[in-house]
Amino acid sequence: MDPVIARHHGLLGTTIELQIWAESPSSAGLVEMAAINEIERLQGIFNVHDAGSGIRRWLTGQAAPPELDEVLALAVRWRELSRGAFDPAVGALVELWDAAAAAGHPPTDEERRAVLAAMRDPADPRSRPSNLNAIAKGWIVDCSLRRACEVDGAVGLTINAGGDLLHRGPRALIVGIEDPQRPYDNEPPLVRVRLPHGALATSGGARRGWAIAGRWYSHVIDPRSGQSVDHVASASVIAPDAATADAVATVLSVSSVPDGLAFVARLEDVCCCLITRDGELHRDGGWLAAQVTP
């Protein structure tokens, strides 16, 4: 059985690609509609750029919709598990770096310390989880796949949302991880892994960031220090669900390689591949077991 391929642009800030296995073409169309409708519905809750979204209303003091409550609780759990390496209040630091870039100089130590203190003060609005991008996108992908697989005639589905991939299908996928130093369309993957089911997410600071006073700063901000970090060029994570893969990849992007590998070792059914700024590969046993040798 070959999958039906569908692509939708402009959702979750990226292109959504679906591979749909279904009993009939009409069933495949219903699966596609269910997946995309769920993404659009949840995007309306989590879109921080939409003044009418659930998260924007919550930030102004209104009640949070149940979906937002669930993701907020999940974000707090990952903040505790990671000892602050994952922090949904990191948006305050992103705003600081945006303002610094506009002013033409990186944030001063005093400015960083002030924002970090505000993030830890429950009375300060900057302590609120204003940036859920590091987990909400994966969570939305999880919900979309669940809803779509409830459709009569659905056999399997893969959702690829610009780096967040979730697969439940009749056969395993072979997924390539690009070289972050050579992200070209015609460049072969640096490594490939076999994904029978589950999620794979990749995070890194190689492409986005700020140019300030002649120097490039990665968009990856360590919420514990407020500093831009780029020692990990790419962090790829295999996990049972996309929200977990998202959160863990974020933690690995700001952690040292030994700390990151130790963190993953404490988690169940999670494995990773780290590519450092210098091009070194670090893979744990679970990743090596999934890796496909050319």
Image (cartoon, grey):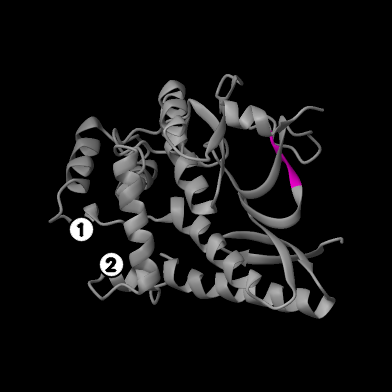
Q: Earlier in the sequence, mark 2 or mark 1?
A: 2
Query: Which quadrant holds residue 70?
Result: bottom left
- Extreme left residue here? 123
Quadrant position of the N terminus in the picture: bottom right
Residue type at tag 1: Pro
Where residue 2 sits: x, y (%)? 86, 60
Q: Does residue 99 appear in the picture of this structure?
A: no
Where residue 71 sits: x, y (%)? 38, 60
Q: Are marks 2 and 1 in contact (CB under 8 Å)?
A: yes
Relative side of 41 to 191, left or right: left
Quadrant position of the C terminus in the picture: top right
Q: How many marks?
A: 2
Instruction: State whether residue 38 is above or below residue 126.
Output: below
Residue type at tag 2: Leu
**Magenta stretch encompasses residue 16:** no
> Which residue is found at the position 49% from the left and 71% from the top?
42
> Which residue is found at the position 32% from the left and 45% from the top?
79
> Which residue is found at the position 77% from the left and 73% from the top?
28
* Residue 59, numbered label: 2
Instruction: State whether residue 31 is above or below residue 245.
Output: below
Secondary structure at numbered mark 2 = helix
